Image (cartoon, rainbow, N blue to C red):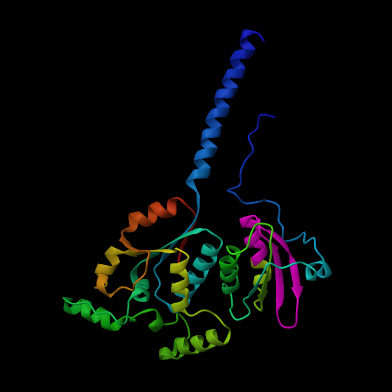
Amino acid sequence: MLLPEIKQGGTNITNNTNNTTMTTDELRTLTVAKSVDARGTACPGPLLEAKKAIGTISSGDVMEILSADEGTKSDIPKWCNKQGHEYLGCVEENGYFKVYMRKK
Amino acid sequence: MDNSTEITMNKFLAELETLKSRTGRLEDSRKDQLSIAIVSGDMDKILAAMIISLAAAAMDSHVKLFFSFWALSALRDPKKKAKGKDIVSKMFGMMLPKGRNKLKLSQMNMCGIGPKMIKILMKKQNVMSLDVMFQEAAALGVEITVCEMSMNLMGFKKEEMIDYPDLRYAGATTFVADAGESSMQWFI
């Protein structure tokens, strides 16, 4: 058809949050290029740390973010969704959790 | 193709072009930008404004903060002094909080005990202090605009404002213009 493709301001409409494709075991076996320990900071600290670190890795690399802040679990997928990075999943550890993502 | 079909087709294409340019304008008119008019000088509200601004900046949204009225107390540098003030301005200067670390809470202020308790809790919960938040905001390129009119009204001077890389002075029109092109416009 002649209808032009409507862009949604650069954001992807499909929500990565709900279709986490990787299982915990798969996530644990990932080769991590960068690990960001943001356990010492509350919201929005982990997101700021992640933003700073993303510039230091190359496209296709996996980054893990360690956080003790519950909000990070939903914040990182939202951030990935907007920036076009791939959200891979989250692993619960004792008292904190690891969030995995792949840079676009 | 006969003549009449060709005319309808051309008409259709022309209309499509108009529509295209209209949607283009709509897309351009709303930038990925957050504009907040911060009028309140309460510690909790300044905190909320800064946290949201940092999150937005981390998401690569452009952030423009417009500080006006009571919020200007948060931009005062306690180490700086301004000369040549009249009596009323001096009174205002004395009665209003001198800097972001002297702000009051909108509730449970309890003569200054509330803010102290909140600061202790923030430290315990690893929440950034306002000092750190302003540093981070500066690093992320968050723009701060001081409302010149309310600054004069409250008797503050440029010399006593904080050192901040993206600090500018402007009027309400600047906020309206900035907010008009932002996808998010708020008032705190």
Residue A9 in the image: x percent, y percent? 58, 48
Residue B156 visible (yes or no): no
Please state, as top left, top right, bottom left or bottom right, where the C terminus of chain A lies in the image: bottom right
Residue A17 in the image: x percent, y percent? 72, 61
Please state if B34 lies on the left or on the right of A99 as rendered. left
Q: Is residue B56 above or below residue B111?
A: above
Residue located farthest toward the top when viewing the structure as drawn: B2
Please state if A70 lies on the left or on the right of B158 as rendered. right
Q: Is residue A17 above or below residue B6?
A: below
Camera-side residue: B9 or A98? A98
> Residue A94 falls in which quadrant of the image?
bottom right
> Residue A40 falls in which quadrant of the image?
bottom right
Residue plotted at (52% across, 58% down): B61
Residue B16 in the image: x percent, y percent? 58, 28
- Whether A88 is among the magenta residues is yes
Please state if B57 lies on the left or on the right of B155 as rendered. right
Residue segment shown in magenta: A76-104
Residue A73 visible (yes or no): yes
- Whether B137 is among the magenta residues is no
Camera-side residue: A93 or B161? A93
Q: Is residue B23 above or below residue B134?
A: above
Residue plotted at (49% across, 44% down): B28
Please tell me how many numbered marks the rendered image carries. 0
